[in-house]
Image: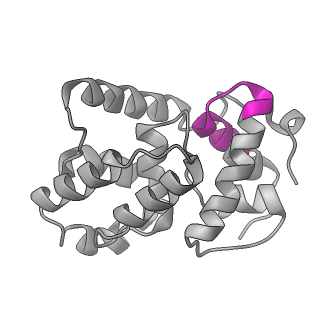
Amino acid sequence: MIRAADIEKLRTEAEDYLKTERLKAGLQRLRKEREPFYLTKGDLDPIFEWKLRGQLNRVKKHLDENSNRTYEIITRAAFSIQEDDWKLEAELRVGVLTVLHGVGVPVASAILALTEPEHYCAVDFRGWRAMYGEKRSAFDIPSYMRYLSEIRRLAGELGWSVQETDLAVWEYDRRHGRTG
């Protein structure tokens, strides 16, 4: 399992760190403008590109099945969930976001990570492999919750946001993980 010392020098080293910071800043501006908060297709497209990279064309057809109104309704519903128990809140929010066509747990986690970086991370095979030493390509809500719990623990040790910690873990795997 990865330790805080393994990633402490990688906080800003990921190749898309600056792009990630710009996305987060834009989403924070939207949060201030929209009450209640929601995202449109135009707001989500850069998140999809950030998360899916080369796989975007493979799922674009499914993402395009959602109307702009659907994106607004579902994201408003997800962000309106406010629970004292962070685990319950995360489970519910991810579950609501996965109602969208083409949005599985990894993409839902990316939406949350970029809109609420203090609390959420984006799950993927790199982070999982770095954290647990296991190869995994599919993620459900329980696996996301397991990963999120560990990233939150590391973030607490480092004094970083959950999303920054996750990006450093991703970069650690990019540098040290085996291919595949």
Please state if 129 lies on the left or on the right of 17 as rendered.
right
Identified at 84% across, 64% down, the residue is: 133
Please state the horizontal and vertical placement of residue 99, each as a whole percent of the image: 32, 70
Identified at 41% across, 49% down, the residue is: 111
Q: Is residue 170 above or below residue 118?
A: below
Q: Which residues are magenta?
A: 156-169
Please state the horizontal and vertical placement of residue 143, each as a whole percent of the image: 65, 68
Q: Is residue 37 above or below residue 92?
A: above
Please state the horizontal and vertical placement of residue 63, each as a whole percent of the image: 26, 67
Please state if 35 lies on the left or on the right of 173 as rendered.
left
Q: Nearer the viewer, residue 81 or 172?
A: 81
Please state the horizontal and vertical placement of residue 144, each as a whole percent of the image: 61, 62
Residue placed farthest to the front in the image? Answer: 84
Residue 66: quadrant of the picture? bottom left
Q: Is residue 52 visible?
A: no
Q: Is residue 149 above or below residue 178?
A: above
Q: Is residue 165 magenta?
A: yes
Q: Is residue 79 visible?
A: yes
Please state if 38 lies on the left or on the right of 8 as rendered.
left
Residue 119: quadrant of the picture? top right
The C terminus - image quarter = bottom right
Q: Is residue 173 above or below residue 129?
A: above
The N terminus - image quarter = bottom right
Dominant secondary structure of the magenta stretch? helix
Q: Is residue 128 magenta?
A: no
Residue 11: quadrant of the picture? top right
Q: Nearer the viewer, residue 125 or 27?
A: 27
Identified at 18% across, 72% down, the residue is: 65
Q: Nearer the viewer, residue 131 or 36?
A: 36
Identified at 48% across, 66% down, the residue is: 105
